[in-house]
Image (cartoon, rainbow, N blue to C red):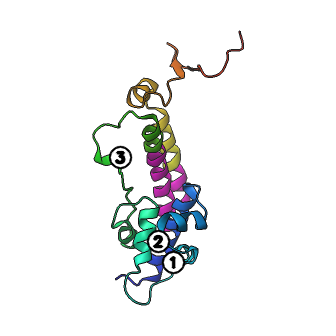
Amino acid sequence: MNRDPESWTRLGRAVRSDRQRQGLSRDQLAQQAGVSPKSIQSAEEGRVPRGRWPYTLDAIERGLGWASGSMQAILDGGMPTPEDDPRSSEEPSGNTASGVKEVVERVSQVYELGRWAADMGADPDARDQFEKAAKRMIESISLEEMKRRFPGLISHVQVRPDGTTIDLSEPSKDE
């Protein structure tokens, strides 16, 4: 088992970051994972276990919705994989809820990579440039393609011939 304190600190930051991203308190994640809030605190503080791999880490991994092995991947310098990794399916389901989840997960992974790189000592300016480039890339996706892949997610948006959009969920000022 990896006993490098920096690796465990990185794991703790990842657990805390994803818990907060999901809008969960420590108590809520503890209940979801079936462990004590103290176990969540220990994981987030990056405490290196004294003995074997604690069973609570596997439970926290599941509670966060990470695939098995994600915590080890983080300790090894990688990133967690969502249990229902959208990269594993060829085409999104088209379900609005899963469409929102996929978009949020993909965007958060982009920004998480930027934070991870900065934590690893990458130039903060390079991280900022990366995040701005990612934002431009996301904004360049055709709204029609988004509507096709995620029906219902943005069905209230219409694209004008000049490329601007109209939000059909808001009453127009002309009415």
Determine crowd level at label 1: few under 14, some 14-19, many 20+ residues with C-alpha closer than 10 A.
many
The C terminus appears in which quarter of the rendering?
Answer: top right
Tag 1 near tag 3, CB within 8 Å: no
Residue located beneath label 3 in the image: 86
Q: Position of residue 94 (x, y in %)?
A: 38, 33
On the rendered structure, is 31 left or right of 91? right
Image point (40%, 89%), residue name = 51
Q: Secondary structure at mark 3?
A: helix
Quadrant of res 24:
bottom right
Q: Position of residue 170 (x, y in %)?
A: 65, 21
Q: Earlier in the sequence, mark 3 or mark 2?
A: 2
**Of the pair 6 and 148, the residue shown nearer to us:** 148
Residue located beneath label 2 in the image: 11
Tag 3 near tag 2, CB within 8 Å: no
Residue located beneath label 1 in the image: 46
The N terminus appears in which quarter of the rendering?
Answer: bottom left
Q: Amino acid at mark 3?
A: Pro
Task: Please give the range of residues in magenta.
Answer: 104-129
On the rendered structure, is 118 left or right of 4? right
Mark 2–mark 1 Cα distance, whole angstroms, equals: 6 Å
Q: Earlier in the sequence, mark 1 or mark 3?
A: 1
